[in-house]
Image (tube, rainbow, N blue to C red):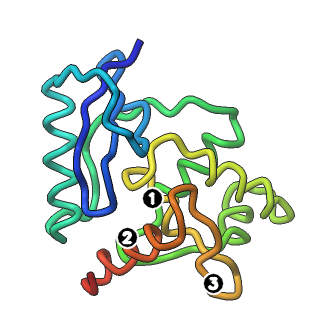
């Protein structure tokens, strides 16, 4: 079972789940979750604070991404998107070797268990529209503006 720590971020209360020495999930929390604060939680919270303050461009906490092979390929591509930049679902589909899989990429992006650190917010539609975001488009816009120094 994962150990959970809560962090009050600029986009709301987040839960950080850690298991076997790695972050396995970041989720919107309701505050009722039992907490155990481990050194990895503290490191993750510190890095998230620095990210939201514009002082951190990439994270260094260990991750354990659990999903299908396709999802893991997509999430690995998300980790390659530079801070402050975006890619389209179609670009990610091409990068994983399946250019017609934009919708499947969208599902993998939606199911990303570690948002922010695995930057699914950096994926937008080919037309330039924000597309979706599991936590709401207002949060996605906030994250993108943060990375562009506009928040």
Displayed quadrant of residue 23: top left
The residue mark sitting in front, 2 or 1, is 2
Q: Residues within 10 Å of mark 1 (few under 14, many from 20)?
A: many
Q: Residue at x 28, y 86 (%)?
A: 150
Query: In the rendered view of the protein, which quadrant contains the N terminus?
Result: top left
The answer to whether 11 is drawn above or below residue 21 in the figure is below
Looking at marks 3 and 1 on the same chain, the residue that comes earlier in the sequence is marked by 1
Left or right of 133 in this view: 146: left
Alpha-carbon span between mark 2 and mark 1: 9 Å
Q: Residue at x 45, y 58 (%)?
A: 119
Label 3, secondary structure: give it: loop
Tally of marks: 3
Question: Which residue is label 2 attached to?
Answer: 143
Residue 129: assigned label: 3
Q: Residue at x 35, y 70 (%)?
A: 83
Q: Residue 124, position in %: x, y?
A: 60, 74
Left or right of 80 in this view: 88: right
Q: Residue at x 57, y 74 (%)?
A: 87
Q: Residue 30, position in %: x, y?
A: 38, 39
Q: Residue 15, position in %: x, y?
A: 34, 38
Question: Which residue is label 1 attached to?
Answer: 119
Seen from the viewer's position, the closer of residues 46 and 11 is 11
Alpha-carbon span between mark 2 and mark 3: 15 Å
The answer to whether 88 is drawn above or below residue 15 in the figure is below
């Amino acid at each position: 079972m994962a150990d959970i720590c809560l962090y009050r971020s600029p986009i709301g209360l987040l839960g950080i789940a850690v298991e076997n020495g790695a972050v396995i999930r970041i989720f919107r929390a309701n505050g009722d979750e039992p907490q155990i604060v481990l050194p990895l939680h503290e490191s993750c919270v510190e890095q998230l604070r620095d990210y939201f303050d514009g002082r951190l461009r990439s994270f260094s906490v260990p991750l354990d991404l659990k999903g299908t092979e396709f999802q893991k390929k997509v999430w690995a591509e998300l980790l390659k998107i530079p801070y402050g930049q975006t890619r389209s679902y179609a670009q990610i589909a091409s990068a994983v070797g399946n250019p017609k899989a934009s919708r499947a990429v969208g599902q993998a992006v939606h199911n990303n268990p570690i948002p922010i650190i695995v930057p699914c917010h950096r994926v937008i539609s080919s037309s330039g529209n924000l597309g979706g975001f599991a936590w709401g488009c207002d949060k996605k816009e906030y994250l993108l503006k943060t990375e562009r120094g506009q928040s």
